[in-house]
Image (cartoon, grey):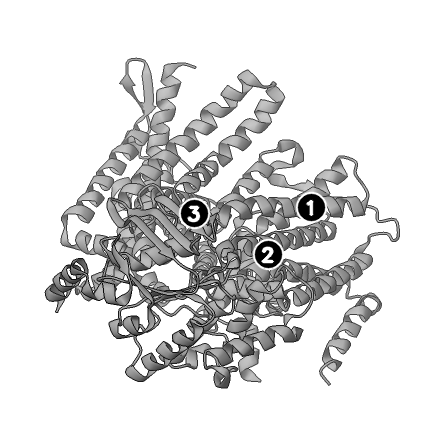
Amino acid sequence: MPPSLFIEQVLNGFQFGLMLFLLAAGLTLVLGIMDTINLAHGSLYMIGAYLTATLVGVTGSFWLAVLGAVLGTALIGMLLELSVLRQLYRRDHLSQVLATFALILIINEVVRMIWGSQPLLLSTPEALSGPVEILPGLYYPAFRLVIIGVGLLVALLLFWLVNRTRVGMWLRAGASNREMAQAMGVPIKPLFTLLFGVGAGLCAIAGAFLGPILAVQIGMGESILILAFVVIVIGGIGSIKGALVGALLVGLVDTAGRAFLPLLLSRVASPEVASNLGPALASILIYLLMAVVLFFRPQGLFPART
Amino acid sequence: MRWIFPTVLLGLLLAFPPIAAAMGLEFYQGLLTKIMIFALAASSLNLILGYGGMVSFGHAAYFGLGAYTVAILMREGVTSGWVIWAVAVGLSALLALLIGAISLRTRGIYFIMITLAFAQMIYYLVVSFKQYGGEDGLRARRPEFGLFELNDTTLYYLTLGVLLAALYLLYRLVHSRFGRVLQAIRENEARALALGYPVFHFQLVAFVLAGALAGLAGVLMAHYTQYASPNLLAWQQSGHLMMMVILGGVGQFWGGVLGALVLSLVEEILQDLTIHWQLGVGLILLFIVLFAPKGLAGLMRRGS
Amino acid sequence: MSLLELLGLSKQFGGLAAVNNCNLRIEAGEIHALIGPNGAGKTTLINLIAGTLPPSRGQLRFQGENITHLPAHQRVHRGLARTFQITNLFKNYTVRTNLELAVQARAGSSFRFWQPVAQEKHLTEAALAVAEQVGLAGRFERVVGQLSHGEQRQLEVGLALASRPKLLLLDEPMAGLGAEESERMVALIAQLAQHHTILLVEHDMGAVFRLARRISVLVYGQVIASGSPAEIRANPEVHKAYLGDEGGAE
């Protein structure tokens, strides 16, 4: 296998992992602090992508569109929190799963009513559409490099927010002991609304940047939502650090598995078996990873509660 | 007087196919068959979800596995209905044993997520085998049963018989010693353990039984549509079954049946009215969860 | 041979040793009280004996058998039953169902899937007998959530009793009880002691010195003294541990 292919796949995995982190960060805080499962988190990712695609058409600028989509999705996220999710904090997990499953159905249909059933076209910005030579002889799409840059930047910003600011201190206190945080006078209700807005904004960033690579269509949020859940279960619910480690792990394992597993299998098995089993194994690799992690560490790699 | 209503209902169900044929309402015979299949699947989920308190988010795995077993065995030349049933139910039970044995070590959100993850594994495994249809699904011809020919009408009666037998079994089960312990574990696991009950074994037995029944429902579904669809394995299908259980009433004996009936009818009606029928389903589900958490069975109980 | 023996039992939580190289013998027929300041590791010790927690080191022997690695539910069948410091009952069920469940756990297999359990008269009879023993016969059909705190504590003992244990582990049975209720609980324990061996963890020193035949004192996860109530009263080590603690706390 040529080393350039290897480097390319690692970068792809890294890039996918960072986008997964943006989705998982909001999800893990909501789950860790409010003990609330929000399946509709993936729908916010979809909304972000749709808003970006539409705003690109209106403004003509990808970056303006991203900004607008992030603000718009954050607003929608906060409205969702105020109207529905707030009712669910004290309910059991089953109710949360079903209510937010209902939200997925509702949001999917509303998106279908507004934008129609056909996938939307969201193309990479003109200036970034070409490849860049990152090492002598190794070309990599400029847009994917930008995704890595944006992902790293947002991740740093998030770590600063959680570890260095007052709001972040409240969040960490809430994740490790909710009752205590409340007793210490943390303004829980507005904090939760704000947190939802931030989480929705992060989803929109991921949606805007993955939209041109994957596809902007109804249901796009659901498969990636399950990946995000795998990420936070591996990382440990409520832990931002766990979400980052888990996301990079899942991104790398998933990408590498799809790229290399069929190749590896073809060396040890017949081509027929390899072409069948390779993709099958690759697609279940991250679920195996999760089962193994949970088997040895039932609370994930970095449990937030002790 | 309590037996009058069930007897009349059973009589109507038995008499329905000839009446439907006479009046040209075959469509409704098919709809009833589908509802009864979902009633079986939802009731099996209700056993672990409602009575056992185990929020399994992967019930589609057994449902879909049952259907795919029919399709694959028929394709490979196994045409005996009885053999296919036995293999399908056995495989579903085995899968549930495997998934349960690992998942039941975890609790809460982790349990929900790991059951979901296992179901996703099965989904991706099945769709990645191109010779079994991949994402297009696989045709499932109807097998031979020897005693009768499987057509739409005999399938209707067969489904009715299986559903009644399964409900009777579940009824005996939840009122037996085993059923009482299963519910006690749901109420207070630490206490059940301190009383000397091997909690894990009770949960695992219920989990396997529910998986086997869901597999049987999947078999019937394959007979009904003559097709094994990846949609049967998808996580939305697990959500769909959970939706039926909560709609009908979690841990209420008729919850699964009632939920399957009402949700299927609502879907049918909304699909006639609008292409955006899922919006209606979502709104109704949201309303039920927020305002009637005990489901329709709970509402009816409160009303009477 | 002692009924229960703890040999060098230890439990670490991270770096903290909640129970540290603990040695203790419970003889058949006695009421053995376990006392000690808050945070001494008493409840951890009960959890180790009952099998709720696995020990980090050491051995547990019950009737001569090594039960260190036996799961909690199997210890119940060997004759070890516990109560909880914080009331732990089936709150939505009646007293009757609570006790029937406890009786059912020892009376034959519960992997019976077909016969209606409601028709098993002998379960009800055995449950009623236990209810009478703990003074709850008049509350038999009540839902537990509606009982007074004192009655719930009585049921807590009843659930342990229903498994016909050889050793009863009572974890602060007096917790949260008023004077009159405490009095009733002391009488109940004294009466149970006629037929059962009891390990009693309790803060109420009046009750402990009235009931116990032997007392062990746990401080920082170690047994610092073991003996008759008179010996414990006279022990300078115990005085130091208690006065130091109480002097600081009150």
Instruction: Looking at the picture, tell me which residue is in the foreground, B99 or B23.
Output: B99
Instruction: Looking at the picture, tell me which residue is in the foreground, C240 or A16.
Output: C240
Mark drawn on residue C68? 3
Q: Earlier in the sequence, mark 2 or mark 1?
A: 1
Tell me the kind of residue under disc 2.
Ala
Check if mark 3 and mark 1 are on a common chain.
no
Residue B292 higher or lower than A138, as above or below: below
**Residue drawn at (74%, 75%) of the image:** B9
Residue C226 seen in this snapshot? yes
Residue A76 seen in this snapshot? no
Q: Residue A74 at x, y = what percent?
A: 28, 54
Are the residues tagged 2 and 1 within 8 Å (C-beta)?
no
What number of labels is visible? 3
Give the labeled residue for mark 1: B90
Q: Residue A145 at x, y = what percent?
A: 29, 29
Q: Residue A9 at x, y = what percent?
A: 38, 25
Give the labeled residue for mark 2: B206
